[in-house]
């Protein structure tokens, strides 16, 4: 049986949505309990933060983002090796996002059936191993295939990571926990765009990619020891009718369009900026990395702040609208 307890200030609509999701995952009975006495419900149920789990998830998220952006930051050197231009960077970026897009839903199903911890670990190891192998390629198409596999692995990490960080953080602070998780991504993005551009100038692009791949594998191993094992339901059913109903939900489709626009804007700025500055304007790798990472530095501060605002207001629509508006004006 799935049980949702909502106290004053909680989003009742969100609770109903969570129960509907529980029914789609096979729970036969669901119940929503509301109370006007917040202290009596939360007292004794206060969750203590599992710092070991949270720290390992945050660290893995940082390295995850490094492996996301490092190829873009060193592409000016890759282009010299393989005689490519900006179109080649577009191909690699498209390959990464193809893997991400195609395996998001299968990754979510795996997380529900086999547990978010196991799925997240598998995804981290797959993405990091593919990133590591990128350093040993001899043909450009090999990098393209490996970037697709990196995206495949990363698709198995995000949803489980959000689930786990919210689970092992304190209760009634889900927005803050996810905000910190996203801030870790932008920390890694800044390292990937700025730090890896400099590292590649010093040691070469191949050793720099090896470094990030090994770090990713190490964070996957760390998660094995730091994140508690999942409690898995052995009788988890997967019904195509339920999946169809969820995927065709009107609000999910609207949210998809919103996130598509946001992601497109962020990708154009962060992925192509460093290469453009180095290749066209002949700016040094360090300065190009700083300029490309500026949006990351600001997002590091904004993510936990907006997460905390969500915890207090529970108005996700307004936050998404303001975020999209700000991004559109910035671009």
Image (cartoon, rainbow, N blue to C red):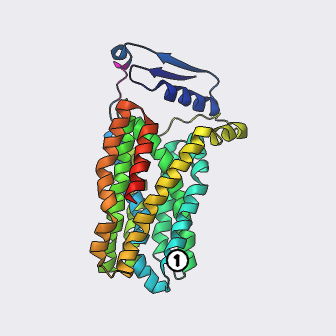
Label 1, secondary structure: give it. Answer: helix
Q: Residue at x 36, y 40 (%)?
A: 307
| Residue 205 position in % (x across, y down) | 39, 77
Residue 10 image-quadrant placement = top left
Q: Main secondary structure of the magenta part?
A: loop
| Residue 266 position in % (x across, y down) | 43, 59
Residue placed furthest toward the front:
329
| Residue 88 position in % (x across, y down) | 52, 77
- In the rendered image, which quarter contains the C terminus? bottom left
Query: From this viewpoint, is residue 238 visible?
Result: no
Which of these two is toward me, 325 or 208?
325
* Label 1 crowd bin: few (<14), some (14–19), many (20+), radius 10 Å: few
Stretch in magenta: 42-47
Position of 183 with respect to 137 (left or right) is left
Position of 299 with respect to 26 (left or right) is left
- In the rendered image, which quarter contains the N terminus? top right
| Residue 159 position in % (x across, y down) | 50, 46
Residue placed under numbered mark 1 in the picture: 87
Q: Is residue 278 above or below residue 34?
A: below
Assess whether residue 45 is covered by the magenta stretch: yes
Residue 165 image-quadrant placement = top left
Q: Residue at x 55, y 30 (%)?
A: 17
Position of 267 with respect to 208 (left or right) is right
Which of these two is toward me, 10 or 147?
10
Q: Residue at x 31, y 76 (%)?
A: 285
Residue 52 image-quadrant placement = top left
Assess whether residue 6 is covered by the magenta stretch: no
Position of 311 with respect to 161 (left or right) is left
Q: Is residue 168 above or below residue 262?
A: above
């Amino acid at each position: 049986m799935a049980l949702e307890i909502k106290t004053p200030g909680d989003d009742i609509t969100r609770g109903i949505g969570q129960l509907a999701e529980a029914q789609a995952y096979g729970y036969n009975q669901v119940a929503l309990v509301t109370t006007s006495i917040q202290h009596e419900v939360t007292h004794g149920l206060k969750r203590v933060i599992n710092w070991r789990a949270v720290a390992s998830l945050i660290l893995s998220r940082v390295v995850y983002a490094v492996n996301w952006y490092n190829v873009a930051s060193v592409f000016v050197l890759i282009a010299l090796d393989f005689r490519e231009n900006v179109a080649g960077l577009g191909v690699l970026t498209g390959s990464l996002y193809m893997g991400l897009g195609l395996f998001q839903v299968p990754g979510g199903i795996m997380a529900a059936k086999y547990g978010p911890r196991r799925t997240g670990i598998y995804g981290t190891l797959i993405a990091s191993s593919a990133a590591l192998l990128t350093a040993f390629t001899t043909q450009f198409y090999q990098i393209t295939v490996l970037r697709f596999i990196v995206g495949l692995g990363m698709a198995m990490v995000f949803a489980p990571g959000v689930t786990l960080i919210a689970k092992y953080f304190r209760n009634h602070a889900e927005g803050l926990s996810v905000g910190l998780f996203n801030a870790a991504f932008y920390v890694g993005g800044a390292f990937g765009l700025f730090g890896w551009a400099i590292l590649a100038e010093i040691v070469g692009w191949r050793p720099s990619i090896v470094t990030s791949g090994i770090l990713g594998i190490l964070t996957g191993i760390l998660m094995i020891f730091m994140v508690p094992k999942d409690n898995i339901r052995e009788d988890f059913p997967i019904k195509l009718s339920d999946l169809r109903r969820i995927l065709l939900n009107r609000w999910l489709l609207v949210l998809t369009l919103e996130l598509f626009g946001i992601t497109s804007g962020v990708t154009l700025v962060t992925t192509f900026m460093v290469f453009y500055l180095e290749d066209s304007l002949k700016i040094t790798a360090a300065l190009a990395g700083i300029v490309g990472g500026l949006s990351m530095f600001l997002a590091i501060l904004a993510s936990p702040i907006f997460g905390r605002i969500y915890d207090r207001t529970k108005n996700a629509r307004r936050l998404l609208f303001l975020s999209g508006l700000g991004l559109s004006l910035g671009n």
